[in-house]
Amino acid sequence: MLFINLYLPPYKIKMSIDHSASSPNTNRRTANYQSSIWANSFILTNTPDDEITLPAHEMQQLEDLKEEVRRKLMAAAGDTSKQLKFIDAIQRLGVAYWFEKEIEEALQSIYDNYHVTNDMNQDLYYVLLRFRLQRQGFNISCDICNKYKDENGSFKESLLNDAQGLLGLYEAANLRVWGEDILDEALAFTTTHLMSMVEHLEYTIAEKVSQALYRPTRKRLERLEARPFMSMYQEEASHSKALLKFAKLDFNLVQSVYKKELSSILRWWKDLDFSSELPFARESGGNILLDSSMLF
């Protein structure tokens, strides 16, 4: 029997320590990062004792408008298309967190009372808007897209006359999951044609298409989406003045919260003197707040 000696003698490693590196007189290279864009402006204009609030009359107006928006949301229950569009506007204006229960109940009711025949007389945009909103919490089949295909299995050319509907199909296709080939086809179809027609559309719809092609709604951060969507929403003839005003007041309130939090973080960063203690570390106080507020 053959035996293999697996014993290996220990190696001796010689280490030399360069004591000059620890010398206080040694000049180390610096990271030479650019100064933070936040500077001290937020520290100087905000203090820890500043209240996070709006003027009293605006706070009362905020409460009144909130109740008015809630009533409008519930009153739209008799018109599914109108209610879906209102919910979409609430979400994209960044104020859905005020109406989570009402939105959940509305979508649940639409889901419970839905029948495939309901879509037969609705246009493409509202059919896909229902799909997009409900897919965020319900098991919605993508088979509804089949009725927009011709006998050859391709999407109908008539869809090219409906830019709003194509946009709805594009947004819905971005919620696809693995194995949903029809939504893969829909994404390729809508992307190609929206890119070719965007320059020839009216401003209101062209702006929506441009932003969607750059980053679809599903991939946007709600709070960053709110401000540009306000400008587009107020151009819509059917927009709710109460909802728009409520969204603007809410935006100002949330902005004051972020300013106070940013001031606190930057003050903490400055008090710890990171720039001197850790010269190789970036001044990332503002980034810390942005990352955390976008996650939660």
Image: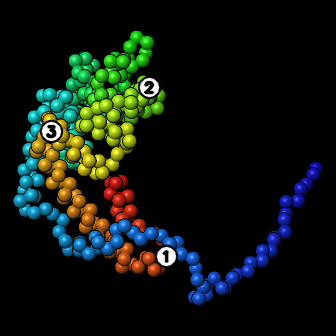
Residue drawn at x 31%, y 31% as measured from the top left: 200
Residue 121 appears in the figure: yes
Mark 2 to mark 3 CA distance (whole Å): 33 Å
Which residue is labeled 2 in the image? 185
Q: Amino acid at mark 2?
A: Glu
On the question of residue 144 being in view, the answer is no
**Residue 257: x %, y % from top left:** 23, 62
222 relative to 27, above or below: above
Position of 131 relative to 28 (above/below): above
Vertical order, 199 against 17 (above or below): above
To which residue does mark 1 refer? 279
Dot 2 lies on which element? helix
Rendered location of residue 28, percent (x, y) = 58, 79
Q: Are marks 2 and 3 in contact (CB under 8 Å)?
A: no
Q: Earlier in the sequence, mark 2 or mark 3?
A: 2
Colour scheme of this structure image? rainbow
Q: Of the residues shown, which amino acid type is indicated by label 3?
A: His
Quarter assignment of residue 214: top left
Q: Would you call the spot at circle 3 few (<14 residues within 10 Å), some (14-19), or many (20 or more)? A: some
Question: Which one is closest to the eye, mark 2 or mark 3?
Answer: 3
Residue 239 marker: 3
- Residue drawn 36% across the image and 26% down it: 141
For this orientation, the residue located farthest to the right is 1
Mark 3 secondary-structure assignment: loop
